[in-house]
Amino acid sequence: MTTFVILLTACTHAGLVELGFGFFKSLRAVHNIIPKVEHCACIVDLFCRLGIQEAYEFLCQMEVDPNVIIWGALLSASRTFSCIELAKRARIHLCLYGLLSNIYAGVGRWQEALEIRKMMTGK
């Protein structure tokens, strides 16, 4: 799994959109690996470099639930492409993580609150 995340990240930083997406598709088709949220985050980031709409369409079709990292990448790309509507959608999802963490903390479920906060910071 880690090898593909590194490979996809390298494609993202090099701007190799088609090659990176080809590697992503090969996860299941060739290597019989079910894509995890980490792989999908790399592809959303990869598509954000191509265009915001492509990234959002991929996000909507993912088999895994997008996490705060994915929504953050979309929010950042929304700024780059001046796309207010997608920025609003990303912001709503990001705010929900903060709200959930606060709810856990409010009822004394500190471990769950901490896990949400760690997820929000990507640690």
Image (tube, helix red, strand yellow):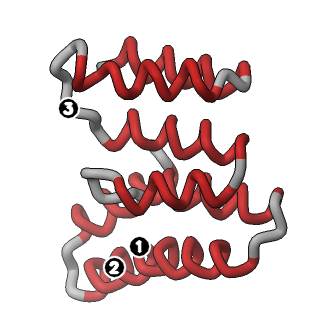
Q: Nearer the viewer, mark 3 or mark 2?
A: 3
- Please tell me whether residue 118 is drawn above or below residue 117 in the rendered image: above
Q: Nearer the viewer, mark 3 or mark 1?
A: 3
Residue 75 position, x and y percent, is 65, 63
In the rendered image, the quadrant that contains the C terminus is top left
- The reply, left or right, for residue 24 in relation to residue 105 is right
Which dot marks residue 100?
2
Q: Residue at x 20, y 23 (%)?
A: 33
Q: Residue at x 50, y 59 (%)?
A: 57
Mark 3 touching mark 1, by CB under 8 A? no
Q: For the residue labelled by badge 1, is the local secondary structure a helix, a strand or a loop?
A: helix
- Please tell me whether residue 65 is drawn above or below residue 92 in the rendered image: above
Mark 3 highlights which residue?
34
> Foreground: 63 or 6?
63
> Foreground: 83 or 37?
83
Residue 102 position, x and y percent, is 38, 82
Q: Residue at x 36, y 18 (%)?
A: 2
Mark 1 touching mark 2, by CB under 8 A? yes
Which residue appears farthest toward the left when viewing the image?
32
Q: Residues within 10 Å of mark 2 (few under 14, many from 20)?
A: some
Q: Residues within 10 Å of mark 3 (few under 14, many from 20)?
A: few
Q: Distance of mark 1 from mark 2, alpha carbons?
A: 5 Å
**Badge 2 amino acid:** Leu
- The reply, left or right, for residue 12 in relation to residue 35 is right
Mark 1 highlights which residue?
97
Q: Distance of mark 3 from mark 2, alpha carbons?
A: 28 Å
**Badge 3 amino acid:** Ile
Q: Earlier in the sequence, mark 3 or mark 2?
A: 3
Residue 55 position, x and y percent, is 57, 52
